[in-house]
Image: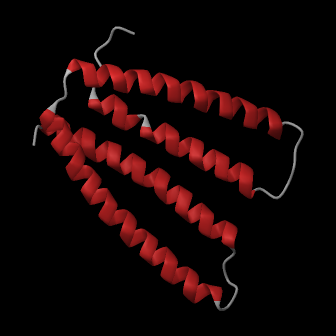
Amino acid sequence: MNKKVSLREIVGTKIIYAIILVSYYWMWARTDWKDWYPTLQLVLGCFLAAFFAFQQMRIKKYKKEGVDEMAERNLKRCDSFCLKIFVAVMVVVAWGCAILGHVNAINMGMIGWIIVLSILILSIIRTLMFVIIDSKGV
């Protein structure tokens, strides 16, 4: 790939990592067993290893090409905002777990799903926010 690497590409691929995280959580949290689950785990593990290696090569190439300082500042703004959102969501989850834990209304698997899905949603929000801010040149 001789195409120039953009920060949008690097930020956007974080969604794939979040999808892989959700997939692995599903594998750990499931309560049934099918014969094709080990195959899926192997395929997902190989994909993760190959994707990670490819991503590292792209990041190395991005750093050699020269960094877009304005895009880096926009990414820091997006990260700052997303951190605040994530902390607020996790505080709500923690309080909800504390309250609902007394009446056994929620199980630990559900809490895990809330956490990993919030990571996935936040990675999508971060990417969209970065693309919008970066395209406007703010």
The answer to whether residue 96 is above or below residue 36 is below
The spot of residue 2 in percent (x, y) is: 34, 8
5 left or right of 86 in image: left
Residue 8 or residue 55, whichever sits in front: 55
Q: Quadrant of the C terminus?
A: top left
The spot of residue 15 in percent (x, y) is: 46, 41
The residue at 66%/78% (across/down) is 106
The spot of residue 36 in percent (x, y) is: 84, 36
Residue ranking furthest to the top: 2
Q: Quadrant of residue 104?
A: bottom right
Colour scheme of this structure image? secondary structure
Residue 126 or residue 28, whichever sits in front: 28
Q: Quadrant of residue 137?
A: top left
The residue at 75%/35% (across/down) is 40
The answer to whether residue 58 is above or below residue 116 is above
1 left or right of 19 in image: left
24 left or right of 81 in image: right
Residue 65 or residue 88, whichever sits in front: 65
The residue at 74%/32% (across/down) is 42
50 left or right of 33 in image: left
The spot of residue 6 in percent (x, y) is: 27, 25
Residue ranking furthest to the left: 138
Q: Quadrant of residue 114?
A: bottom right
